[in-house]
Image (cartoon, rainbow, N blue to C red):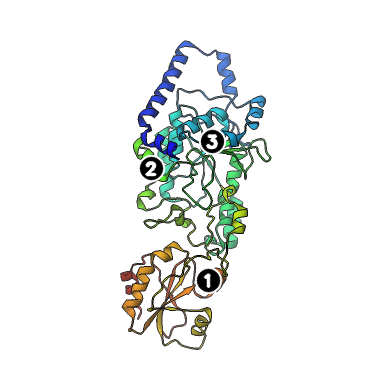
Amino acid sequence: MASATTSISSHPAALRDVKAARIGGLRQQQASVAPSAAAARGQRARAVRSLRAAEPARQPVAASAAAAAPAAPVADEAAALAAVDYEALARELEGASPLEIMDRALAMFGSEIAIAFSGAEDVALIEYAKLTGRPFRVFSLDTGRLNPETYQLFDKVEKHYGIRIEYMFPDASEVQELVRTKGLFSFYEDGHQECCRVRKVRPLRRALKGLRAWITGQRKDQSPGTRASIPLVQVDPSFEGLDGGAGSLVKWNPVANVDGKDIWTFLRTMDVPVNTLHAQGYVSIGCEPCTRPVLPGQHEREGRWWWEDAKAKECGLHKGNIDKDAQAAAPRSANGNGSAGAPDIFESPAVVSLTRTGIENLAAPGEPRRARGSWCCNAPWCPFCQAMEASYVELAEKLAGSGVKVAKFRADGEQKPFAQAELQLQSFPTVLLFPGRTARPIKYPSEKRDVDSLLAFVNSLR
């Protein structure tokens, strides 16, 4: 960790020296050796293999116009790559900088490796690849649900680096079937995995079938539950490469040991394009419906799929990170949400704790409610519920003696289906108001959870 951090913090001059040395070496070589026409034709014949094997071969994206594309590995070279002990290589590279790791990856795999670019801070990978002076390829998954700012970044990156990103798209018939059957936002109701499988995982699988290795922007500090142990290089545990079968694809994670703050130091130092959503509080950026800003002090992955209980927040692209044995052995609470140790919240004499039976009695048809009240469907482990605790308790204290009761209901685990069906629960927290003598509660529509906003909502409907 320390070595990677040091290399980022102090590397601008070093990187310029490295790059200058490489460019100088190339110029010297070009001045002294003139390639023959036959050699040039032979080199062109070894064109870059497309991400999709069925497509015609095309020239790879070049990081430097002066650098010639290396030949794809021949059979003996491919066999040599397959024989590499990648666990030992990962240990060898543990103290290396991201630039050194990127250089090793591109040198080993030539045109049969590509950078996976998501349109977020992993633009750092493209900058490192450019600084090696070697040719490189970039691909991205266009799910059809990305933010406009992400598409704008794609365009800026292509122009900044003089490259063409190789986009992969989901199968139109699969998307059509999913949307016609379950609607545009089914993931809010039954989880994100199915949509991610159609829009991300299957397109990625097609992309990787044309490669022997790929490069990701995974970092250990991104998701402590799933990425804390990722190596710098590994045999991909989930996907297959060009030759097919287990072990046919190698996965490189050059910034695995780098802290997020150091990535941003690097991006600012090198003055590279970044997604404008970062300035709006977004840290981890995915599809528009499944990404939102995080609050100060929250972990970056808490802005992804925030309505789900799961702690293993992976879309399937890096599902090999999830330790199934550890997940199965994790202690689980009686309500099945895996949060046995989460202390209760909204603890105040002014806040009434409701049970399901109490809610069913209040909501019984034909019994008009004379009591008015505000309820919060919460989950103690949810960081957004925790963040509004002070505001909700203050709301209860302000409304004490007003005839409006402020209550809480733990709506995760076994109670979640009931809350979804009867209490309009989509994500935590869900705040409801019962004005009295109404058939259904009114759901608070805003993401603003300060006490003044909550109080204005209650007072407007009293």
Q: At 40% from the left edge and 48% from the top edge, which residue is drawn?
A: 149
Label number found at residue 264: 2
Residue at image position (54%, 44%) is 230
The residue indicated by pointer 3 is 114
Mark 1: secondary structure? helix
> Can you say which quadrant of the picture contains the C terminus?
bottom left
Cα–Cα gap, marks 2 and 1: 39 Å
The residue at the far right in this view is 245
User: Relative to 422, is 173 above or below?
Assistant: above
Q: Measured along the vertical axis of the image, is residue 21 above or below residue 148?
A: above
Q: Mark 3 or mark 1, which has the lower sequence index?
A: 3
Residue 81 drawn at (x, y percent): 62, 30
Residue at image coords 54%, 46%: 229
Q: Are marks 3 and 1 in contact (CB under 8 Å)?
A: no
- What amino acid type should be assigned to the residue bearing mark 1? Gln
Question: Taking 322 as reference, is 431 left or right?
Answer: left
* Residue denoted by label 1: 420
Residue 394 in the image: state x and y as whole percent: 33, 73
Q: Residue 245 occupies which quadrant of the picture?
A: top right
Q: Residues within 10 Å of mark 3 (few under 14, many from 20)?
A: many
